[in-house]
Amino acid sequence: MGKYYYKTSAETKRNSKTFDNLQNLYPDIVLIEGSTEDLINYREKIKTGSTVYFNDYFKLLDDFKEDSRFFMFFYMECYYANVDICFINTPECNISYIKSILNTLDIHPRDGETELVVRKLIESNIKQAKINQSMAFNLKSTALQTAKENGVQIGVKKGTVFKNPKADSLKEKIKMHSKAFNGNMSDVELIEKLGIPRTTYYKYKREIKHNKKTAK
């Protein structure tokens, strides 16, 4: 069955590469271009069993912000036609996932109540999606901050050497004062004197020893 992708306005502004990456997985995937109105009108061309991919639930909803009812109209049209909607970054809102919840809990909405039940499930899942995204963001920020404190350069080739005047100055002080080199201070005393984290201190100390070996 067919595979389709709709690029939201937020992705267009940021020059998102999600569609390009999906093309590597699915060479025949079709890009649906235009506005949300064009997306709704395109629905009739999408056959049963197909999948429509979106980058993110929140980004798509932003494009429908003038009237979110049209979003649910499109969503339910796909739902009844057995066309899966797949949100890459918010899979909690995928049609296939919503249907799996109903099947697992053996829930069979009465006539006229399906959209209400689906809407409630989406609202509940979105709350969890927001928590997941917030946690992922916080973990990434913490990891980047830790890497920065340890002198790790993000987004560069391994082995690339950068000049760091502050680090070079600290290394000179370590060589001057540490018992392991030319001084008479213990590691504990020197860490306190320099006012740097233990991880940073031992990282610089290892680099000093490594440089001495390679210089021989």
Image (cartoon, rainbow, N blue to C red):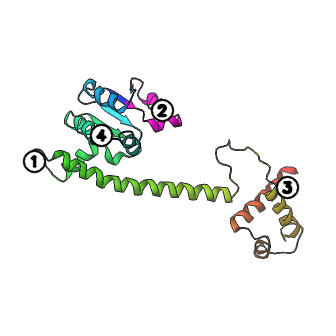
Q: Position of residue 106 (x, y in %)?
A: 15, 51
Q: Callout 2 environment at 10 Å: few (<14), some (14 to 19), or many (20+)? A: few
Q: Amino acid at mark 3?
A: Lys
What residue is shown with label 1? 110
Which element is circle 3 on? helix
Q: In the rendered picture of this protein, how many numbered marks are placed on residues?
A: 4
Which residue appears at 86% of the width and 62% of the height? 172
What residue is shown with label 3? 212
Per the model, the C-alpha gap separating discs 3 and 1 is: 77 Å
- Residue depth check, mark 1 versus mark 2: number of the one nearer the observer: 1
Q: Earlier in the sequence, mark 1 or mark 2?
A: 2
Q: Amino acid at mark 2?
A: Asn
Which element is circle 2 on? helix
What's drawn in magenta, residue-wise?
5-30
Q: Amino acid at mark 1?
A: Arg
Question: In this rendering, does residue 16 appear at all?
Answer: no
Q: Amino acid at mark 4?
A: Phe
Q: Callout 3 environment at 10 Å: few (<14), some (14 to 19), or many (20+)? A: few
In the picture, which quadrant includes the N terminus? Answer: top left
Q: Is 59 positioned to the left or the right of 48 in the image?
A: right
Per the model, the C-alpha gap separating discs 2 and 4 is: 25 Å
What residue is shown with label 2? 21
Which residue appears at 35% of the width and 40% of the height? 64
Per the model, the C-alpha gap separating discs 1 and 2 is: 40 Å
What residue is shown with label 4? 71
